[in-house]
Amino acid sequence: MPSSSPADIFAALGDPTRLALLVALRSGGTRSIARLAATSAMTRQAVTKHLKILERVGLLRVEQSGRETHFIYRPEALDGARAYLDAIGGRWSDVGSAVRSARV
């Protein structure tokens, strides 16, 4: 499985289309490109392009079933990005507490 930096994951999720595809996949199970494209105004080729980016950063796993490609959401791939946000959030909380204490 690819191990991407938090910046790579944030960049991939920064696109509204990719974010929407990930939300559609989060319910579990597998989804084919045809099934994902059917619920979108995009072509299969456009959906495939976005799915490949999500796969490249490790947010999706791919399985072949005959001629169909199925995509599966990997929520554990967000752990590193989540930890990074928690660390940043903690630092901001620490700075905010120090500023509030200095005012008192």
Image (cartoon, rainbow, N blue to C red):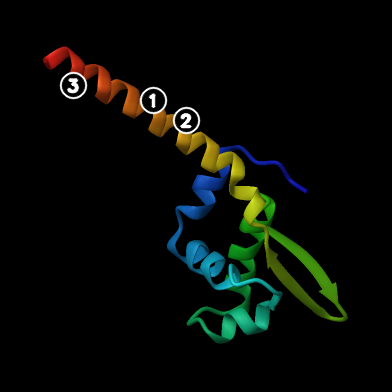
Question: Which circle marks residue 100 in the picture?
Answer: 3
Q: Is residue 96 left or right of residue 66?
A: left
Residue 39 at x, y = what percent? 53, 84
Q: Quadrant of residue 24?
A: bottom right
Q: Secondary structure at mark 1?
A: helix
Q: Could one spot residue 7 in this view of the protein?
A: no
Q: Nearer the viewer, residue 104 or 52?
A: 104
The CA distance from mark 1 to mark 3 is: 14 Å
Q: From what the image shows, is residue 51 above or below residue 81?
A: below
Q: Could one spot residue 8 in this view of the protein?
A: yes
The CA distance from mark 2 to mark 1 is: 6 Å
Tell me the amino acid under the disc marked 2.
Ala
Tell me the amino acid under the disc marked 1.
Arg
Residue farthest toward the top in the current orientation of the protein: 102
How many marks overall?
Answer: 3
Q: Residue at x 67, y 77 (%)?
A: 33
Q: Residue at x 66, y 60 (%)?
A: 52
Dot 2 alpha-carbon crowd within 10 angstroms: few under 14, some 14 to 19, many 20 or more: few
Q: Nearer the viewer, residue 80 or 43?
A: 80
Q: Which residue is mark 2?
A: 87
Residue farthest toward the right in the current orientation of the protein: 66
Q: Are marks 2 and 1 in contact (CB under 8 Å)?
A: yes
Q: Secondary structure at mark 2?
A: helix
Residue 42 at x, y = what percent? 52, 78
Q: Earlier in the sequence, mark 2 or mark 3?
A: 2
Q: Residue at x 58, y 67 (%)?
A: 26
Q: Which residue is mark 1?
A: 91
Mark 1 or 3: in front is: 3
Dot 3 alpha-carbon crowd within 10 angstroms: few under 14, some 14 to 19, many 20 or more: few
Q: Is residue 51 left or right of residue 17?
A: right
Tell me the amino acid under the disc marked 3.
Arg
